[in-house]
């Protein structure tokens, strides 16, 4: 039985780590490279001159979310023996955020339509189109914050299951739950104080690196 559990653990670790670069590229890198806060015209120019990068960011984020659909299902198989009911809660909380994230990318696609100046938008001036594009980019940020609530919530049952498993180090479970706190705090702060720029998840994500790395390279400690 142990080899089978280890295969499941390593698959979960591989999926978790594979998801990370797609998500970072689509959610963090591309917006930071193209969006100029408070300057709709400069942002529009950056997007249209680097349209390939902008589209790659959209695609990358969607690929990351597709991987994220598979991840909790594999983790469910690994952690179900610990507590079947809590494992189901983990899967539900994880999957709720996926459709939010997918639908949220429509904001980015709408930006491309606005800046592409199709004929039916001729009634709007260039400045108006740029302002609308900036509004959609802002809405996308709010959509990510909403999805991030569930990216944080699912880490609590996951971390608890790891902590109680007996075949994974307890410290990994604690670190994963700390990561969940980081996501939730960031979401609440952004929704209440959107201009604050506060982000603690950049300091609390360690568990989401160590946990999948342990699964991939160490597996479980015993049956």
Image: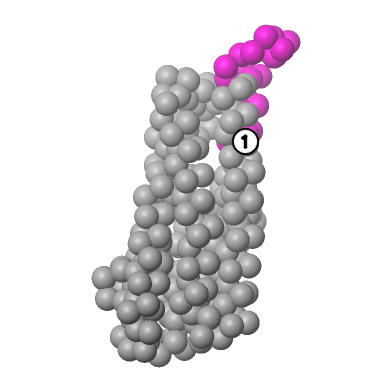
Colour scheme of the picture = one colour
Q: Circle 1 sits on which residue?
A: 107
Tell me residue 154's x, y (percent): 56, 69
Res 134 seen here: no
Residue at left offset 63%, top offset 82%: 85
Q: Main secondary structure of the magenta part?
A: helix
Quarter-wise, where is residue 171 in the image? bottom left
Front residue of this view, candidates 100 and 80: 80
Residue at left offset 35%, top offset 72%: 7
Quarter-wise, where is residue 166 in the image? bottom left
Tell me residue 76's x, y (percent): 52, 73
The residue range painted magenta reads 115-138
Q: Residue furthest left?
A: 217
Residue at left offset 60%, top offset 61%: 95
> In the shown orientation, is residue 161 left or right of residue 103?
left
Quarter of the image where the C terminus is located = bottom left
Res 2 seen here: yes
Residue at left offset 37%, top offset 55%: 18
Where is 198 relative to 59, above or below?
below
> In the shown orientation, is residue 104 left or right of residue 20?
right
Tell me residue 10's x, y (percent): 34, 69
| SS for callout 1 | helix
Residue 220 falls inside the magenta stretch: no
Front residue of this view, candidates 50 and 41: 50
Q: How many marks?
A: 1
Tell me residue 65's x, y (percent): 51, 51
Where is 168 relative to 195, above or below?
below
Front residue of this view, candidates 137 and 119: 119
Question: Label 1 crowding class (10 Å Cα cut-off): few <14, some 14-19, many 20+?
Answer: some
Residue 131 falls inside the magenta stretch: yes
């Amino acid at each position: 039985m142990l080899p089978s559990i280890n295969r499941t653990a390593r698959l979960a670790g591989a999926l978790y780590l594979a998801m990370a670069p797609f998500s970072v590229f689509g959610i963090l890198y591309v917006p930071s490279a193209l969006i100029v806060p408070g300057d709709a015209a400069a942002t529009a120019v950056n997007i249209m001159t680097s349209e390939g990068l902008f589209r790659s960011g959209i695609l990358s984020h969607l690929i990351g979310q597709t991987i994220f659909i598979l991840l909790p299902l594999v983790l469910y198989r690994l952690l179900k023996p610990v507590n079947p009911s809590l494992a189901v809660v983990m899967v539900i909380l994880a999957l709720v955020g996926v459709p939010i994230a997918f639908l949220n990318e429509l904001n980015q696609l709408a930006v491309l339509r606005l800046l592409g100046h199709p004929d039916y938008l001729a009634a709007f001036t260039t400045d108006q189109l740029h302002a609308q594009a900036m509004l959609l980019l802002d809405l996308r940020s709010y959509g990510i914050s909403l999805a991030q609530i569930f990216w944080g919530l699912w880490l609590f049952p996951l971390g608890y299951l790891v902590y109680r498993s007996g075949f994974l180090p307890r410290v990994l479970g604690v670190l994963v739950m700390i990561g969940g706190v980081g996501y939730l705090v960031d979401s609440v702060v952004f929704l209440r104080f959107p201009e604050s720029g506060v982000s603690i998840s950049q300091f609390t994500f360690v568990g989401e690196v160590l946990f999948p790395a342990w699964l991939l390279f160490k597996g479980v400690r015993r049956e």
